[in-house]
Every structure is written in C-alpha cells, then in structure tokens.
Amino acid sequence: MKKVQVYLVNSFSYQLRGGNPAGVVLDFENALSDAQMQAIAKEVGFSETAFIRSTALADFELKFFTPTDEVPLCGHATIASFWLLNHLGYIAEGSYTQLTGAGELAVKIDTSVPEVTIWMAQSTPDEITPRIEVSDDFIKAFPSIETDQQQSLPIAIWSTGLKDLFVPICSRQALNRLSVNMKALAKLSKTYDVVGAHAFTIEEGKVYARNFAPLYGIDEESATGTSNGALVAYLYQNLQDKAPLLAKDLQLPVYYKMDVLQGEAMSNTSLIQTKLFEEPNLAVWVGGNCYLVGERVLIEAQKTE
C-alpha cells in the first residue's frame, strides 16, 4: 500500500479568504495510474484535483481529475499547483511550462507583489459559436432565462482551452438568484459539447460570474480560471465600449485587464484576474492568489500495469 499526500489549496482567494479549493498531489516519479488518480480525486471530493508529474517535454506535466472524469485543463488547479511548488521551495519566481491535455501552456510566478500571484497562459481564444438562440431545452436548463438574460450581449460558446456556454445576465441580483436545472443543463452541455455554462453580469463597472458544470459532476464552482479567460476574450469581442470595464494598462506591451468576482452566491467570493494582449496575436492570461488550507494522507494500492 502507498501513502499519498494531498495538499488542499484555495485558488483565486479574495482578501485572503474565499477561493476555489483544489487538491494537489506531487507525483514526480509518475507512480500513480490514471485509475488511482481518479480514485484519489473522488476521495478528495473537490471539483478538481491536480497531479504534478515529470516530463521531458515541459517543466512539469499536470493531469486534472474531477470526482468522475479526467479533464484536459483546469485553471484554478493549475494556479494552486504552481503556487504550492513555489510555497514548498521547488521553484522560484520566473516563467515555466506545463504540459496538459490542452497542450503546452506557460505559467509565470510573480513574487514582487504582497501576495504571490500565479499567472497562467490560456490557449488562443476561440469564438466557436457567436450566437445561440434560447430554445426549449435552454429554458429547461435556465427556467428564468427569458427575463434574466442581458439582451444586448449574445449567448455564445467560447474557449481558451475548455469550451463553455457564456450566458449574459441582466443584473447582479438576477445572477445571484439564477435558477438552474442541473439535470437539464448537463443534457444541454452534452448537446453543445461544452464543459458547462458561465453566467455573468456587468454592474457598476464590475464583472460578476457563476459557473455550472453538472455534466462533470460539478453543480457550481466558486472560481474558474479558464472560463474567465474566455470571458475576457468574449467581452473584448462583443463590447462596443471596452473602457473602463476592460481598462488598458499603460505598461508595454499594452494589454487590457479585467477582474472577475465569482462565488458570491455561494458565500465564497473569489477574485480572478485576467489580462488580454492584442499584439502580436490575441493572447489571454489568468492570474490569482492562493493559500494552503491543509493536507490529507490517503492510502492507495500500488500501481499496476
């Protein structure tokens, strides 16, 4: 039998609280099989658990598991993993690469700020479906969508590594009381071949979001990096007036920056920072802070071939 140490890290914390919990396992010897990793993720019970492995193709390989399935990429678990590597002294401030199911992606660690910030490059923004009309199946998933939708923005599918359905909502109050039929949304997600739905609103110059992925056993998450990476690209594409919401930073190279508050309806508010660079090609980075919640030791059977 093998003891497996699981670090419990909250990513995208807000004012040293909140955030989205992720399990992180250091598997530098690549000793765990996929079946063992899946069993560990199920036992941990968080929306995602990350396994940090060795590879000759990048600085690290990261594999991500929900309680029910492996997923190609997870923003908050990536942020948690590289924060932990820095926290434990394995890596210092600088740039690194990670090999994931969504390809090789860059990560930067910034220790020059009061709270260590981890920045993760996203895959190139992809507008998969510019506009989706509200159908009967959509109303089954979101029973109040006909009154809650922000009509000036489209329902659409975007991706910066994971495909999500983006659902604009008319107000912060409507977002927080949004009714969601998880069974119907899981069916809708399968129909559109997306991970889940990212509902959001813009109020008083701030962006608020909620994320639902019942198809992967996750009713709601308090912080989702990849979804908000795609959201900043979606808003860049669809907003006529990009300022002050997407405030331009005067540093070189010039980029847009946007903060998203997520998890308010769960009483677990999280802060997701985003950057969007226009040149030389459209590129998105997602960043956040973390803190260590605790550790667990699980007993796993030895790897079998």
Image: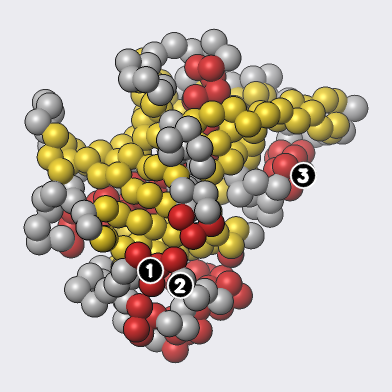
According to the image, label 3 marks what residue?
A: 43
Question: Callout 1, which amino acid?
Answer: Gln
Q: Do we see residue 261 in this rendering? A: yes
Q: Residue furthest right?
A: 1
Q: Secondary structure at mark 1?
A: helix
What number of labels is visible? Answer: 3
Which residue is at the front of the view, 184 or 126?
A: 184
Point out the tag, 3 or 2, that comes first from the N-terminus: 3
According to the image, label 1 marks what residue?
A: 173
Q: Nearer the viewer, mark 2 or mark 1?
A: 1
Local crowd size for mark 1, using a 10 Å CA cut-off: few (<14), some (14–19), many (≥20)? few
Q: Secondary structure at mark 2?
A: loop
Local crowd size for mark 3, using a 10 Å CA cut-off: few (<14), some (14–19), many (≥20)? few
Residue 174, percent from left and from top: 38, 72
Question: Callout 3, which amino acid?
Answer: Glu
Q: Nearer the viewer, mark 1 or mark 3?
A: 1
